[in-house]
Image (cartoon, rainbow, N blue to C red):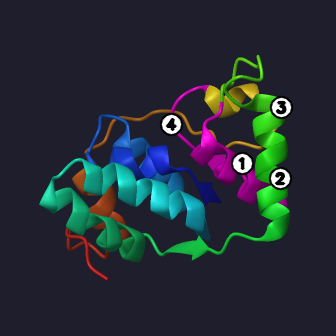
Amino acid sequence: MIVDTSVLVALIREEPDAAAFGRAMGAATIRRLSAANYVELAVVVDGSHDPVASSALEDLLAVWRIQVEPLTAVQARLARAAYQRFGKGSGHPARLNLGDCFAYALARDLGEPLLFKGDDFKLTDIEIVTEPIRHKRLSEVVAAYAGGSGTLRA
């Protein structure tokens, strides 16, 4: 599974849909993040000037065992093609931004579904992760995944 920046921001900020994202990620055998999306995530989180959120970033990646994948030339070309076809300014309703294009490219290159927040990727041709929303506290999901401790740990 490829994880988009939007999902990780939702988890760090404990947004209402964070538990659903946690369940979806917990069901995956492997979770990947493009190196470009890692930088995008760091810019968003560090730009919030919230030291708790900034320190949670690396813990989140470790707890969920999210692999940061290096950007390849193939993925760079796929990201460019995604922007040309689905990007802002292309006229397509998906209106993908730069970071979205890198998540799209990694998913396309590896043939893995993409977990994301919002509606943008639903309007593309990429395989997406879908899960019915069931209400559960994020702390319950993290506790179950992190061995019952309920805390983020590496």
Q: Considering only order in the chain, which callout, 2 or 3, is on the residue closer to the N terminus?
A: 2
Q: Say left or right for 101 vs 153.
A: right
Q: Considering only order in the chain, which callout, 4 or 3, is on the residue closer to the N terminus?
A: 3
Q: How far apart are marks 3 and 1 (CA)?
A: 12 Å
Q: In which quarter of the image is residue 64?
A: bottom left
Query: Which residue is pictured at 76% across the width and 16% down the height?
Result: 91
Query: For mark 1, what is the residue?
Result: 104
Q: Considering only order in the chain, which callout, 1 or 2, is on the residue closer to the N terminus?
A: 2
Q: Considering only order in the chain, which callout, 1 or 4, is on the residue closer to the N terminus?
A: 1
Query: For mark 2, what is the residue?
Result: 78
Magenta segment boundaries in residue numbering: 96-119
Q: Are marks 3 and 2 in contact (CB under 8 Å)?
A: no
Residue 117, disc: 4
- Secondary structure, mark 1, is helix
| Residue at far front of view | 89
Q: Do the residues labelled 2 and 1 touch (CB within 8 Å)?
A: yes
Q: Say left or right for 51 vs 101.
A: left
Query: Residue 65: percent from the left, percent from the top?
Result: 47, 75
Q: Distance between the residues labelled 4 and 1?
A: 13 Å
Residue 85, disc: 3
Query: Which residue is pictured at 58% across the width and 47% down the height?
Result: 99
Q: Do the residues labelled 4 and 2 touch (CB within 8 Å)?
A: no
Q: Which amino acid does label 3 sit on?
A: Arg
Q: How far apart are marks 2 and 1 (CA)?
A: 8 Å
